[in-house]
Structure formats: structure tokens, C-alpha cells
Image (cartoon, helix red, strand yellow):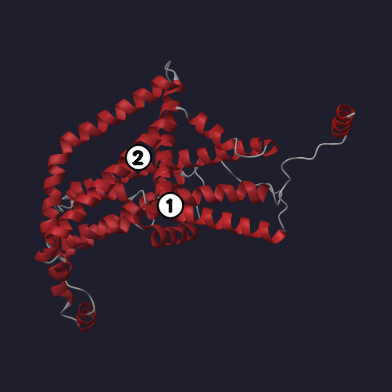
Amino acid sequence: MSDSRSNLEENDSQSRPQESRYEPVSRSPYTRLVLLITLIVSLVLLLWYAVDVFLLIFAGVLLAIFLRALSDWLTQHSPLSGGWSLAVVVMVLISVIGLLGWLLAPRLAAQIDELSQTLPRSIQHLSQGVERYGWGRRILERTPSFEDLIPDKSDVLAKVTGVFSTTFGVIINAVVILFVGLYVAVNPKLYKDGVVSLFPLRKRQRASEVLDAVGSTLRWWLLGKVIAMILIGILTTVGLWLLDVPLALTFGVLSAIFTFIPNVGPPLAILPAILLALTVSPTRALYVLLLYLLIQTVESYLLTPILQQRVVSLPPALTISAQILMAVLLGGLGLALATPLTAISLVLVKMLYVEDVLEADAEVLR
């Protein structure tokens, strides 16, 4: 009797729908809002505290785009495959940089050492000339002297330690940029597909188009910028040499490097040359200033329009505003990368807002 009863209970339990062991946790709208805010705040904090890492990665991506641009050109004009073209480009660049370093490094190092000794005298000479005027004396009274900027002997050890740590940090940053650039350049499709896969299926085609447009914009911007850096460096070196300004090679290299930062970089590069020319004569300093204005005129009205035929045209006020903002928030690296980041932002606004939201035509490199 008991057996039949147990069988009936078992059959009854099997006939009834089984209740789930795990019940879904119901969250109120308030709980969902708190979780969403927590997630957004966490992402913002992550981006803020790791922004230097993201900037280094972005610099590595710029290097990868530059290497791929050269290797793709070589692939189109030679029987080499993409991988061999990239290897040839990297080897050629290493050889050129090594040869220039071997030929110019000793002379450049000597000129930089001479500049570090001559520049304080130039500043002192300028101060003595300005002190003759009342307005000049008032300005100098509110300006720290050059001696105040020199560290005290008691702080020498701390300053030397800081120099070593800064130099080590620069080397580490350069290594990170180099390896990120090489790895991305070897197989850019892998990383592009990884980014595209983060979007829903119906949005992946559009995401791929946007990434292609961003890559094309950065590629042509980089090529134009490298050409401008080389030409301006050569023009500055030759011009200062013809004017018989000391350390012409050093100032030419500085001008080439600072040209990467538009609007802000060129004046910073030419200022030491003007100060040094003052030690020779005020007329020589005036000639250096006129040379700078001539080179900038050539760049603005001849070189830049030719290069910008295939490059996105950035409004100057927008570029300067982005540079100031990035410099204040992120320092020197943010200032150096402000222009390409602005170019990317402009492409995203045109494609994702003007084209997709407003459904209007926008001029974007494809």
C-alpha cells in the first residue's frame, strides 16, 4: 500500500511543472540607474587615470599607420608582398636614422652643449637692453631671473635623480610606442576586426566604414606632416647658415621636430635662435625673425594648400582650442597629439552626426 502511494506521489510530481531552482532577481528602476551611474563613473575614472597609456597607444597607432602607408606604396610599385614591403620599410628607416645619427649626432651634441652655455648669456644681454626702458624694468621686476631657475646645490642630487627618472620614462614610452606601432602595422586587420566586433551586427558595416575613413585621414595627415617637417627643417638650417647664425643645425632639427605641433611649435622653435642672434647684433636677430616669417609664409600659402588637397582641413581656431585644452589637461603629450585627435573627432562628427543623424552630405576621406 505504501509502495503504491509513493508511486502515485512520484507520478504527480513528474506531471506538475518543475519550479526553477534559480529565480531571476528583479531590480527596481532605481537600482538600474545606480548601476548605470556606477558603470559610467568607473569608465570615466579609468579613462582619466589611464589617459597617458591611451595616448601612448594612440601614438603607436599613428606610427603603425605611417609604416603601413609606406609599405602599401612599396607594395603597389614593386613585386614585394605586404609583409616584405613592411620589412623593407622598417629596415630602410632604421638605416637612415642610424646613418643620420652617426653623421650628425656628435656635431649636434656639441651644438646643444654650446647652446646651453650661450643661451643664458643671450637672455642676460636681452635683459640689459630692456632695462634701459621704464616698461622693461617693470616687466623684469615681475619676471624670475635665470639664476632663480637654476637649482640650488642642495637640490642637485634630487634634480639628477629626476633627470634620470625622466629619461628612463621617455625611453620606456618610446619602446611602448615602437612595439605597439610594429605589432599593429604587421596585422592591422586583426585589430580593426576586433574593434568592429564590439558593435552589434547591424552596425558593423558602418563601424568598418568609419574606421577606414579615420585611417585614411590620419594616413594623409601624417604623410603631409612628415613632408612639412623635413622641408621646414632643411629651409631653417640653410637659412640660418646663410645668415651666419651659430648652431644652425640644432635650430633646424628643433624646427623640424616642433613642426609636428602646428601653430604652437614653430614659434617655440625659432625663439632660441632669435635670442642667440641677439648676441651677435639686433640686426641679425631681425633677419632671423624675417627668415621665420618667410618660411611660415611658404608653409601656409604654398606647402600646406598642396598637402591639404588630400588631407582634412582643420579650422585654425578649433585646432588651437584643442591644443590649449589638451595641454592643460594632459601635458606635453596631449599637446603633441591634439591635432590628430581633433582630425579624428571631426571625421566622427561628420560621419556619425552629419551623415547618419542629419542625413546630409559630408566631405570625408574614404
- Total number of numbered discs in the rendering: 2
**Amino acid at the residue labelled 2:** Val
The numbered mark at residue 51 is: 1
Badge number at residue 285: none
Query: Residue at 60% across / 59% down in the picture?
Result: 37
Q: Nearer the viewer, residue 327 or 78?
A: 327
Q: Is residue 157 above or below residue 4?
A: below
> Within the image, what quadrant is residue 83 found in?
top left
Dot 1, crowdedness within 10 Å: few (<14), some or many (≥20)? some
Question: Label 2: few (<14), some or many (≥20) within 10 Å?
Answer: some
User: Which residue type carries mark 1?
Assistant: Val
Please indicate whether residue 360 sits to the left or right of residue 19 in the image.
left
Taking the image as drawn, is residue 13 in sight? yes
Q: Is residue 313 visible?
A: no
Query: Which image quarter holds the C terminus?
Result: top right
251 relative to 205, above or below: below
Report helix, strand or loop for mark 2: helix
Q: Is residue 157 left or right of residue 28?
A: left
Image coords of residue 270 (percent x, y): 26, 57
Residue 68 image position (x, y, % from top left): 43, 31
Which of the image's four quarters has the N terminus?
top right
Does residue 39 appear left or right of residue 33 in this picture?
A: left
Q: Where does the image place residue 229, in percent across and percent down from the top left? A: 33, 44
The residue to which callout 2 is attached is 176
> Which is nearer the eye, 36 or 144?
36
Q: Residue at x 67, y 59 (%)?
A: 31
Which of the 4 image quadrants contains residue 285?
bottom left
- 40 or 127, nearer to the observer: 40
- Mark 2 or 1, nearer chain start: 1
Report, in whole angstroms, how far the alpha carbon at label 2 lies from the one at label 1: 15 Å
